[in-house]
Image (cartoon, rainbow, N blue to C red):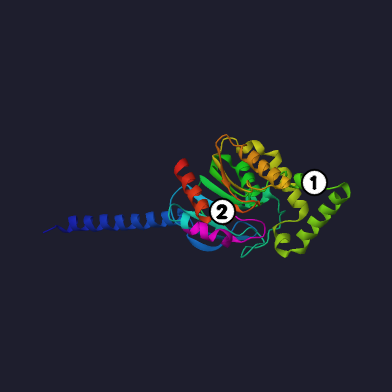
Amino acid sequence: MLSIKVFERVIIVLVIVFVLGIAAMNLYSLNAPFEGEGLIDIGEYSLFIKSEGSGTPAVIFESETGESSSFWSQVAEEVQKHTRTVSYDRAGIGKSDKSPYNRTSEQKAIELHSLLNKAKIKPPYILVGSEYGVHHIRMFAAKYPTEVAGIIMVDPRTDKLRELVLSTLHDDEKKKFDILMKQEHEKSAKKMQDGSYEEFLASNQQVVDHQASLKNIPLTAMISGFNSVDHLILEIVEDQVKLAELSEKSKVVKIPSINTYRAFGETELIVQEIIEMINKVK
């Protein structure tokens, strides 16, 4: 039989092991990435986040103007089978609080970075953006280049789009165009919460000023409109290809269509390209 002293020592060891186990569990809990969905306080306001799956690199989805986190739901459901996915509502959209700060792409990148830090979603990240949302992920890459493993652009809105459209108009029509665009922003409550027309123009300049930030980042651009016979559409497509070529590690996926901004409907192909990027950068 065990002596009383040996028995006491065994009990002490078991207690220590138990306490250390609890401490380790608590430490893991404190550092574990956010799971599920909910609001996270990033300072003066909270943003809604949905984090599912597990693994690295995490895939972060950035939605088009005025769209909530559900914008990418079909794609995220498939990608989370391979790694962690994160969708979120930008400030003023969906379930997120409004932000007291400007709604430029740079500010949105800062807010996303704060959200990922608070949610303990560790880099590196693969950033996936659609249309104007591409501006925001470009600014994220500019501000936090070491945290970006790859970028997927779906129907990217280029910084020269306004310029291309204006080139097709007469002088009197050019003035009307900006007035009309401003009215469209002001008419839509969603777009107002996601930024004014002036903030859109400011964001445009921000990505122009940081074009070099894409140079060393693996990048896939999914572009539609290659089959068009419309001169303006072909110019837009050409500009989207030039945007992709800002990266020395770029790939262009051509979506056969006669119109631009049709790539988002290619859910299976988008999932395929994201998975390919995951495997490439691991």
Image mark for residue 60: none
Q: Residue at x 82, y 53 (%)?
A: 177
Q: Residue at x 63, y 58 (%)?
A: 90
Read off the magenta span: 62-77
Residue furthest to the front: 229
Between disc 1 and disc 2, the foreground one is 1
Q: Position of residue 135 (x, y in %)?
A: 66, 47
Report the residue marked by disc 2: 61
- Specify whether 6 is left or right of 111: left
Of residue 2 and residue 246, the one placed in the foreground of this image is 246
Of residue 127 and residue 7, the one placed in the foreground of this image is 127
Residue furthest to the left: 1
User: What's the residue type where badge 2 is placed?
Assistant: Phe
Q: Position of residue 8 (x, y in %)?
A: 22, 58
Callout 1: SS? loop
CB of mark 1 within 8 Å of CB of mark 2? no
Q: Residue 67 colored magenta?
A: yes
Q: Quadrant of the N terminus?
A: bottom left
Instruction: Residue 218: name its quadrant.
Output: top right
Label 1 vs label 2: CA separation? 33 Å
Image mark for residue 168: 1
Q: Residue 64 colored magenta?
A: yes
- Specify whether 186 is left or right of 41: right
